[in-house]
Image (cartoon, rainbow, N blue to C red):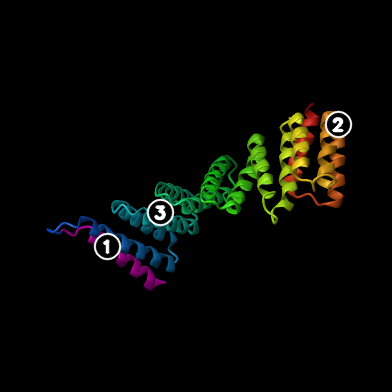
C-alpha cells in the first residue's frame, strides 16, 4: 500500500509537470492528454492504497484535463470513477456531484445507457443516505435514469427504476406520481410472458394509492379497468382485498379496512411497505 501511495503521489506530480510543457510546434492538447493519463493512473494507485478520497480528487483532476481535450466519453468515465472513490470514502457530497456531472456529460454526448447508469448510481446513493428530506432528489434521479433506459430500449432496467420512483413517491405521499408509475409498470408487465404474473402486484399498488389519496372513484374505475386488462386478476386474493377496501372506504368503515387487511395477511404475509400503505388507507376512514 505504501508503494502504491508513493506511486500515486509521483504520478500526480508528473501530471502537473506535463501542464508546464511548452512546444513551438503547437499540439497544445497533447499536454492535457498526457496529464489526464497521469492523473487517471494516480487515481488507480490511490485506490490500491485505499486512499479513496485522494483517488476521487485525482479522477476529478483527470476529468478537468479530458474536458479540455473535448473527450466526453473519457470525462464521464473518470467522473464515474471519482464518484465510486468518494462513495468508498463516505464523502456523500462529492460523490453525488461526481455522479451528477457524469450523467450530464454522458447525456450531452448521446451516451444514454451510461447516463442512465450514472443517474441510477446517484439515486441509489441518495436513497441509501436515508435522509427523508433528500428523497425527492432520489426520485428525480431514478426518473432520469428511467427515461434514459426507455430511450435506449431497455425496458427491464427502466422498470427497475420506475418501481423505485413509484415506491418512494408513495412513501412521500406523492400518490398521483406513484399511481402513474405503478399503472405503467402493470401495463408493461402484461407485455411479456415472464412479467405478466407481476401485473396484479403493480395494479394492486396503484389502486391502494388511489385509496390512500382518498380518490375512491378513481380506485373503483381503475380496479374495473385492470380486471379487464388482466383476466387473471379477478378471483385473486388481491382483487378480493381491493374490493373489500373500496367498500370499506365508501362506507367510511375504519374497522372494515383493518379486517380486510388482516384476512389478507393471514394467507399472504404483508410486507412493511404494503402495511404502511394500508395504514394510510385506514387513516382516510378515521379522518372522515
Q: Position of residue 185 (x, y in %)?
A: 66, 46
Looking at the image, the residue that sits furthest to the top is 288
Q: Nearer the viewer, residue 137 or 147?
A: 147
Viewed as shown, does residue 125 lie left or right of 197?
left
**Residue 245, picture quadrant:** top right
Residue 127 numbered mark, or none: none
Viewed as shown, does residue 183 lie left or right of 124?
right
Residue at image coords 43%, 69%: 48
Is residue 38 placed above or below 205 in the rendered structure? below
Give the mark, 1 or 2, whose residue is nearer the N terminus.
1
Q: Secondary structure at mark 2?
A: loop
Residues in magenta?
A: 1-22
Q: Nearer the viewer, residue 260 or 14?
A: 260
Q: Position of residue 101 (x, y in %)?
A: 42, 48
Residue at image coords 67%, 43%: 182
Q: Position of residue 230 (x, y in %)?
A: 76, 45
Residue 76 numbered mark, or none: 3
Q: Secondary structure at mark 3?
A: helix
Q: Are marks 2 and 3 in contact (CB under 8 Å)?
A: no
The residue wearing badge 2 is 253
> Disc 1 versus disc 2: distance between alpha carbons?
72 Å
Residue at image coords 63%, 37%: 177
Instruction: Characterize the magenta stretch by its predominant secondary structure.
Output: helix
Q: Quadrant of the C terminus?
A: top right
Viewed as shown, does residue 27 lie left or right of 10?
left
Viewed as shown, does residue 225 lie left or right of 45?
right
The residue wearing badge 1 is 34
Amino acid at each position: 500500500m505504501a508503494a502504491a501511495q508513493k506511486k500515486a503521489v509521483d504520478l500526480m506530480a508528473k501530471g502537473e509537470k506535463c501542464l508546464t510543457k511548452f512546444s513551438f510546434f503547437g499540439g497544445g492538447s497533447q499536454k492535457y492528454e498526457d496529464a489526464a493519463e497521469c492523473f487517471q493512473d494516480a487515481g488507480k494507485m490511490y485506490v490500491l492504497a485505499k486512499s479513496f478520497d485522494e483517488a476521487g480528487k485525482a479522477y476529478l483532476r483527470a476529468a478537468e484535463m479530458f474536458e479540455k481535450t473535448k473527450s466526453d466519453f473519457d470525462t464521464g468515465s473518470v467522473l464515474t470513477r471519482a464518484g465510486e472513490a468518494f462513495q468508498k470514502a463516505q464523502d456523500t457530497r462529492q460523490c453525488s456531484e461526481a455522479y451528477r456531472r457524469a450523467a450530464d456529460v454522458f447525456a450531452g454526448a448521446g451516451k444514454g445507457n451510461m447516463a442512465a447508469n450514472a443517474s441510477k448510481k446517484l439515486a441509489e446513493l441518495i436513497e441509501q443516505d436515508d435522509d427523508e428530506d433528500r428523497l425527492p432528489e432520489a426520485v428525480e434521479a431514478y426518473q432520469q435514469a428511467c427515461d434514459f433506459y426507455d430511450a435506449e430500449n431497455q425496458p427491464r432496467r427502466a422498470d427497475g427504476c420506475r418501481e423505485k420512483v413509484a415506491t418512494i413517491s408513495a412513501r412521500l405521499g406523492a400518490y398521483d406520481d406513484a399511481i402513474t408509475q405503478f399503472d405503467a409498470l402493470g401495463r408493461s408487465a402484461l407485455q411479456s410472458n415472464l412479467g405478466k404474473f407481476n401485473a396484479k402486484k403493480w395494479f394492486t399498488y396503484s389502486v391502494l394509492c388511489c385509496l390512500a389519496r382518498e380518490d375512491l372513484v378513481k380506485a373503483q374505475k381503475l380496479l374495473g379497468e385492470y380486471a379487464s386488462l388482466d383476466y387473471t386478476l379477478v378471483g385473486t386474493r388481491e382483487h378480493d382485498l381491493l374490493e373489500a377496501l373500496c367498500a370499506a372506504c365508501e362506507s367510511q368503515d375504519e374497522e372494515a379496512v383493518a379486517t380486510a387487511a388482516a384476512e389478507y395477511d393471514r394467507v399472504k404475509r404483508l410486507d412493511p411497505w404494503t402495511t404502511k400503505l394500508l395504514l394510510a388507507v385506514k387513516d382516510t376512514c378515521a379522518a372522515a
